[in-house]
Amino acid sequence: MDPQKPALDDLRIKRNDKPESNLRIRPVAIGIVVLVLATGVIWWLTRPKAIEVRTVVAREIGGASGDHTVLNASGYVTARRAATVSSKVTGKVVELLIEEGMKVKAGQVVARLDDTNVKTSLDVAQAQLESAKTAVEETRAQLKQAESEFQRATNLANKNIESQSDLDKAESDAKSLAARLARQQRDITATSR
């Protein structure tokens, strides 16, 4: 036999005769059982207790008068109607004008909200509206100037003094400003609603 070739015994897989024990699984299983038992005991000790109800016996007081009966009882009072109160806008309540259990009428103010953010937004919107109105006036002035230029260019082009490209540019400027003015007026109408 060649000394470099392994013997058949060297190629054999060595196995233990004893299977591996389940000692690693036992502590985990015991831990789970203890955890389940502890959870059950905690739940049993903290479960909600039954509500104690007192009973009262009604009986007649006195004997001879007969018309007078007193009844003592305990219980809960509930409203016939309940209403949900809400606001169109969200905000911080700064003043509450009613208390729980008070009667209210339709349209009665029950609370006041902080309106500083809304007032600021209104001021910004009003400033933007004024700015848009000023821009419209500026565009009107520019349009009037452009229409005058277009009219002058038309007259000069009819006399062959002005070139066609200058006439076309004057017409384009006038139409562009007219379109801008119409858009700005629509924006103002939409903003002021």
Image (cartoon, rainbow, N blue to C red):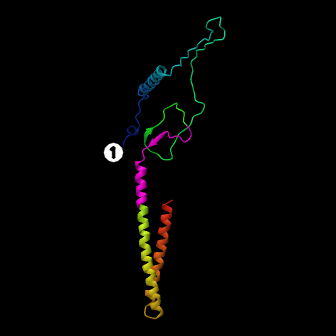
Is residue 118 one of those drawn in magenta?
yes
- 22 sits left or right of 56 in the view: left
Q: Is residue 79 visible?
A: yes
**Above or below 129: residue 39:** above
Which residue sits furthest bottom? 160
Q: Is residue 87 magenta?
A: no
Determine if residue 167 is in view: no
Residue at (48, 65) in percent of width and height = 187
Span highlighted in magenta in the image: 105-127
Residue under the image location 44 percent in, 70 percent down: 136
Question: Where 64 falls versus 142 (above or below)?
Answer: above
**Residue drawn at (44%, 25%) of the image:** 35
Reading the image, the residue beneath label 1 is 4
Residue 146: where, in percent of width, then height? 43, 80
Amino acid at circle 1: Gln
Determine the residue positioned at 41% across, 56% down: 123
x then y, percent, for residue 77: 57, 25
Residue furthest to the left in view is: 3
